[in-house]
Image (cartoon, rainbow, N blue to C red):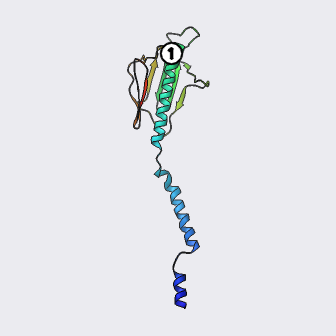
Amino acid sequence: MSETLRRHTCCGFTLVELVAVLVIVAILAVASGPALFDDSPFEQRGYVDEMAAAINAAQRTAIATACPVRINIDANGYSAVQRTAGPDSCNPVGAFTIPVLRMDGTPLSGGSPSTVGMAPAPTTIEFDASGAVSNGPTPTLSSGTFSISIAQRTGTVTVQP
């Protein structure tokens, strides 16, 4: 009978051993989990969509105010500015110093996520009062596998996956 009892007590795991294994597995999961889930394609797509919307907003502002708008893109993000625009006039010369405002009154600008960049940077795109690109052909902007192209004559923005 002692052999039968000994066989049952020597086989299997104790509760302490099971808890220890679960704790080790949990620590490994916490340590290696972020490396298994790379979300950079989602960040890239989100930033490309944000940039395309900002370029569209800059173009619409140029048309609405009948005053040129310039959007500057660099490694840190983007910002849109225009020349002084009055109710019935636009300063045809001078510096682009007035920030373009969104519908909610905040400046049309934004920063790029730390893991996402836009190339080539820096890039400046200037829209005239008709919404066309007035400072020459714009390069195709890209972030990862996504790209933005802007038609020079119409200012149409196209995002390619």
Where does label 1 land, which residue?
63
Image location of residue 48, percent across then percent down: 46, 33
* In the image, residue 155 above or below residue 12: above
Q: How many marks?
A: 1
Q: Is residue 95 visible?
A: no
**Residue type (three-letter) at the residue carrying disc 1:** Ile
Asked whether, in this view, residue 122 is left or right of residue 80, the answer is left
Q: Quadrant of residue 124?
A: top left
Q: Secondary structure at mark 1?
A: helix
Number of residues whose C-alpha sits closer than 10 Å to that of mark 1, classed few (under 14), some (14–19) or many (20 or more): some
Tell me the residue at 55%/90% (across/down): 2
Q: Position of residue 3 (x, y in %)?
A: 52, 89
Residue located farthest toward the bottom when viewing the structure as drawn: 1
* Quadrant that contains the N terminus: bottom right
Residue appearing at x 55%, y 68% in the figure = 20
Q: Position of residue 64 (x, y in %)?
A: 53, 15
Residue placed most toward the observer, 9 or 75:
9
Q: Is residue 107 visible?
A: yes
Instruction: Name above or below for residue 19 compared with residue 41.
Output: below
